[in-house]
Image (tube, rainbow, N blue to C red):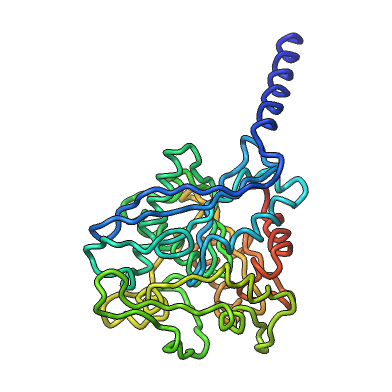
Amino acid sequence: MKKLQLNLKGFVVLAFLICAMMVPAVSAASEITFPVTLRGGSAQITVTIYENPKGWCGGANILAVHGLTGNANTWQPLAQAMFAELGWGRTIKRVIALDLPGHGKSPIPKNLAGGPWGNLLIDDNISVIMQTILALQAKNMGPRVIMGHSMGGLAIQGLQEALMKTDLSLAHLGIFRAVLLAPVPAYGAEWTQGPEADVTPFIFGTAGDPVVGQYLYIPAEYAALGTDWMDLNYITVPNRPSVEAIATYVAPEPLYTLLQLVGRLEPMGYTRPSARQGAFNIINGTLLNLVSFSQDNLVPQANLEALYPYLTGSPLGLFYRPIDTDDACHNMLISNPAQVAKTLKTLGPF
């Protein structure tokens, strides 16, 4: 028995050393591109992979989904901050940041039979997310955790609902934790939208264009003045990135995605995606973590305090974390990623 224990210990040490040799010495980013089916056509999707230099073989792959007018770059600051968290960061192997169709490194699809790119809905994003999970599994990089910000968090709620309609769930896709950062609440839960902004000057394209259609694009110099970088008094937070940095985080957005998000397509039968009460009850196999920001003008903290028990069926709020600081704006994952990473650490290892 003693000899067996020594051999087992030696095996564990050997496995650890082999794993350590497989991890890059410095944090690196690479890309993978793969096709998805979309509206009777196809699209090329790119993900950016941020490798954790301190991660280990059994660490989690995290699939990260950006919000409206965002791209995969929005996740780099938080990924680096999570990797840097002592001890806890080692439980993360890599962050895989998705570029939705027409965002970042994913090109605008050219061959959609179901209308131009500008007519894509959040529901189309949900389909792309599910196909991305399957594509990553085929490459032995299946995610154990899915993370979404703002509209990306809404899409994750919608994906869980879509799966549950077929008696499945995110757990059936190998995802056992969902992390929502300032998510737009699913249809059926309360979302108190702020004053409507006139985005007409930022709408480009032509409705009759069969390939591109109409889309929203807010240049960095204007995006830097947006409420997602402001506190509740509409004062820009002091740690907002430079305009040059913000330029790397913005992307064009299909017009219909925006219209569906704010309820303008409801007369056409397109509400924002829904999720049933208890969709993330732990009996469904996926633990829900939800983080809100106290200075968020776009998704009020009060709405998310109510969303957590709505989605989990639990009034205890065990895995809900409000960040109550003066700089806790909607885009805090970029402006103060270290604070967001420390908050996520309190939720337990990934």
Figure quadrant of the N terminus: top right
Q: Total label count?
A: 0
Residue 339 image offset from top left, x and y in percent? 73, 64
Residue 31 image offset from top left, x and y in percent? 51, 49
Q: Is residue 86 above or below residue 242?
A: above
Visible residue check, residue 172: no
Q: Residue furthest front?
A: 244
What residue is shown at x 68% (from left), y 55% (from top)? Answer: 80
In this view, the residue in front, 293 or 81, is 81
Q: Is residue 175 above or below residue 165?
A: above
What residue is shown at x 64% (from left), y 32% (from top)? Answer: 22
Question: Quarter-wise, where is residue 210 in the image?
Answer: bottom left
Residue 5 image offset from top left, x and y in percent? 73, 15
In this view, the residue in front, 348 or 123, is 123
Visible residue check, residue 206: yes
In this view, the residue in front, 310 or 216, is 216
Residue 164 image offset from top left, x and y in percent? 36, 55
What residue is shown at x 44% (from left), y 64% (from top)? Answer: 155
Q: Is residue 228 above or below residue 79?
A: below
What residue is shown at x 65% (from left), y 82% (from top)? Answer: 230
In this view, the residue in front, 65 or 311, is 65
Query: Going by the image, does 111 lie left or right of 281?
Result: left
